[in-house]
């Protein structure tokens, strides 16, 4: 069986280095724009540049958020026999068995997660924590979300929600 995240599979997910380079360039542009605010004498000119500075700061923080948290967002999960093959946002493959699962928790996204992920993440999801300490977020955008919960835990969905 294959479960895909309906949002992430329909969007292009560039490599992590892309986000690092873009964030660095945006920080330089933000710094140069902030210098212009000091040099302008008109209030209107300062206002326009300040709006630009705040927008570039928002996008650079969003890129940093993706760099830091992107490895943890699950793009797809494929089951082959007793093994699961997980693909994260940056297309990195992780293979695990049900015995390697430490815990699965129902979670709500924090407001900060929603803001810096451009509001595309649903509020509900699962945190899949493996015994090696890695944590992955499965969003409720995943196809057959309830069926995936059953397969991962090997029990009924009602038992998970308790």
Image (cartoon, rainbow, N blue to C red):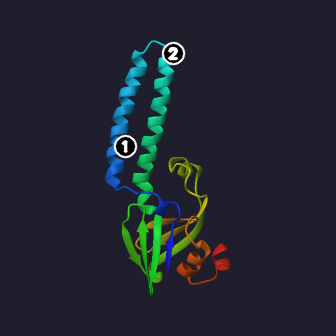
Q: Looking at the image, which residue is at 38% across and 64% down?
A: 91
Residue 37 lies, with reference to residue 140, above or below; the image says above
Residue 36 lies, with reference to residue 5, above or below; the image says above
Q: Are marks 2 and 1 in contact (CB under 8 Å)?
A: no
Residue 126 lies, with reference to residue 83, above or below; the image says above
Q: Earlier in the sequence, mark 2 or mark 1?
A: 1
Q: Residues within 10 Å of mark 2 (few under 14, many from 20)?
A: few
| Residue hosting label 1 | 23
Q: Mark 2 falls on what kind of element? A: helix
Spot occupied by residue 32 in the image (x, y as percentages of width and height) = 35, 27
Q: Looking at the image, which residue is at 49% across and 75% down?
A: 102
Spot occupied by residue 45 in the image (x, y as percentages of width and height) = 47, 18
Q: Is residue 161 left or right of residue 9?
A: right
Q: Is residue 6 left or right of residue 157?
A: left
Dot label at residue 43: 2
Q: Residues within 10 Å of mark 1 (few under 14, many from 20)?
A: many
Q: Looking at the image, which residue is at 58% across and 57% down?
A: 109
The residues tagged by marks 2 and 1 sit, at their Cα atoms, a distance apart of: 28 Å
């Amino acid at each position: 069986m294959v479960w895909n995240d309906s949002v992430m599979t329909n969007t292009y997910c560039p490599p992590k280095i892309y986000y690092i380079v873009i964030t660095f360039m945006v920080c330089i542009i933000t710094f140069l724009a902030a210098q212009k605010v000091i040099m302008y004498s008109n209030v209107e000119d300062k206002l326009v540049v300040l709006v630009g500075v705040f927008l570039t700061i928002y996008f650079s923080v969003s890129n940093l958020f993706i760099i830091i948290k992107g490895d943890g967002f699950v793009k797809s999960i494929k089951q082959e026999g007793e093994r699961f093959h997980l693909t994260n946002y940056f297309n990195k493959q992780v293979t695990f068995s049900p015995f390697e699962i430490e815990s699965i928790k129902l979670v709500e996204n924090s407001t900060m997660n929603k803001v810096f992920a451009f509001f595309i993440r649903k509020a509900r999801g699962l945190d899949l924590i493996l015994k090696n300490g890695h944590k992955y977020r499965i969003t409720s955008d995943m196809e057959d979300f309830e069926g995936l919960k059953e397969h991962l835990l090997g029990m009924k969905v009602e038992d998970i929600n308790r």
